[in-house]
Image (cartoon, rainbow, N blue to C red):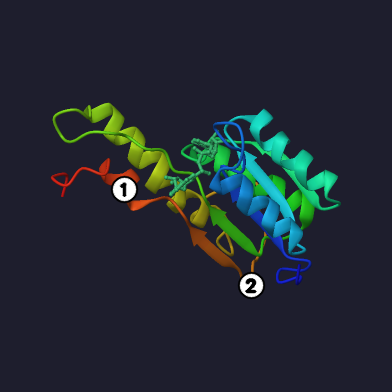
Amino acid sequence: MTGRVEHKIAIVTGAGSVGPGWGNGKASAVLYAREGAKVFAADLVLEAAEETRSIIDQEGGACTAYQADVSDADAVCGLVDACLNTYGRIDILHNNVGIPEVGGPEEISEANWDRLFDINVKSMYLTGRARLPHNVFCADIKHNLEKEIIENIAHDKNWTGGHPRMF
Ligand SMILES: NC(=O)c1ccc[n+]([C@@H]2O[C@H](COP(=O)([O-])OP(=O)(O)OC[C@H]3O[C@@H](n4cnc5c(N)ncnc54)[C@H](O)[C@@H]3O)[C@@H](O)[C@H]2O)c1
């Protein structure tokens, strides 16, 4: 490994995996750690984040597992606050979370459409907003971030259900 993100602090959302083996979030978190970053691994399912932390631990890297729903504004504020309390800053925000919803307008209910956008799209707004310098959206966070990298990973097919007639 080449230490490309040596000493950086990386939040990875959806850092676990829904199934056995490797998902994008788990693989990204482990790769950040292999490249020298300290990883703040957030997931809706704590056990999934813990599994990723365990892999990183076994490889000698640094990782903290944290439970949060990234579609929930308060939970996202808590996530950013917890990362800052643990590691002092955030250099990389890797918005990995994305869920699929199969079907076209006839099949996808309005409630599921809203849920899809809350998880796949609003989550990027919430995480981006929560780590803004001079944050006024999260009461407890007092920090001033200077420079960071934001990666938004969720697949565009997740927004449309992959259906050719959705837009
Ligand atoms: N895995 C692939 O082969 C693949 C290929 C192309 C694109 N993608 C896209 O990459 C993104 C992530 O893929 P993945 O493989 O990491 O997915 P995954 O389905 O394995 O999910 C990763 C984690 O996200 C967590 N999660 C789900 N909803 C959450 C929420 N509201 N808050 C916090 N965590 C939540 C899950 O608990 C899970 O542990 C998705 O948008 C997916 O469509 C994946």
87 left or right, relative to 44 = right
- Coordinates of residue 20 in the picture (x, y in percent): 60, 32
Q: Dot 2: within a 10 Å radius of its alpha carbon, few (fewer than 14), some, or many (20 or more) residues? A: few
The residue pinned by badge 2 equals 146
Q: Is residue 9 left or right of residue 19?
A: right
Left or right, residue 45 beside residue 6: left
Q: Residues within 10 Å of mark 1 (few under 14, many from 20)?
A: some
Q: Is residue 112 placed above or below 129 in the rendered structure?
A: above
Residue depicted at x 34% and y 44%: 158
Residue toward you, 15 or 110: 15
Amino acid at dot 1: Lys
Secondary structure, mark 1, is helix
Is residue 139 something that shows in the picture?
Answer: no
Can you give x and y, in whole percent of width and height, for residue 97 in the image? 49, 44
Is residue 5 depicted above or below 33 in this figure? Answer: below
Nearest the viewer among 41 and 132 is 41
Quarter-of-image position of residue 64:
top right
In-image side of 65 versus 108 (left or right): right
Quick one: quadrant of the N terminus? Answer: bottom right
- Which label's residue is closer to the chain start, 2 or 1? 2
Rendered residue at 56%/31% (across/down): 19
Kind of residue indicated by mark 2: Glu
Query: Residue 74: which disc?
Result: none
Q: Position of residue 7 (x, y in %)?
A: 78, 66
Look at mark 1 in the image and give the residue it sits on: 157
Q: Which residue is rendered at x = 31% and y = 46% of the image?
A: 159
Label 2 element class = loop
- Kindly tell me whether residue 63 is visible in this rendering: yes
Viewer-proximal residue among 92 and 55: 55
Q: Do the CB atoms of the residues marked 2 and 1 lie less than 8 Å apart?
A: no
Count of marks overlaid on the render: 2
Q: Within 8 Å of ligand 1, the CB of disc 1?
A: yes
